[in-house]
Amino acid sequence: MLQFEPKPDGFRAIVFARTDLIRAQSRQGSDLTPAFPDIVQAAAQVGEDLVLDGVM
């Protein structure tokens, strides 16, 4: 079964946050971290391991 979700209004991304690393990446694995500094900074303030999936 093929599923398709168009995202013309933003980037679908996953943010991984640990105490030693924070990275935002596309579903294809491209590094989006430099493009979203506000989201990276907010993830750093959580203080726990974190994985977020969403549209940026």
Image (cartoon, rainbow, N blue to C red):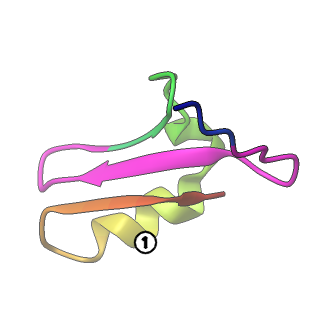
Residue at 30%, 75% (x, y): give it: 45
Identify which residue, 5 or 18, lies in the foreground.
5
Which is nearer the eye, 11 or 31?
A: 11
Instruction: Say which quarter of the image contains residue 18.
Output: bottom left
Q: Is residue 53 left or right of residue 46?
A: right
* Dot 1: element: helix
Q: Residue at x 87, y 46 (%)?
A: 8
x and y, in percent, of residue 26 in the image: 53, 34
Picture quarter containing residue 46?
bottom left
Residue at x 78% of width, y 44% of height: 6
Residue plotted at (50% across, 32% down): 27
The magenta region covers 5-22
Residue assigned mark 1: 42
Q: At which x and y percent is residue 53?
A: 44, 58
In the picture as drawn, the residue positioned furthest to the bottom comes out as 46
Q: Amino acid at mark 1?
A: Ala
Q: Main secondary structure of the magenta part?
A: loop
Residue 35, compared with residue 44, is above or below; it is: above
- Counting from the top left corner in percent of width and height, residue 51 is at 28, 58
In the rendered image, residue 24, in percent from the top left (x then y), is placed at 45, 43
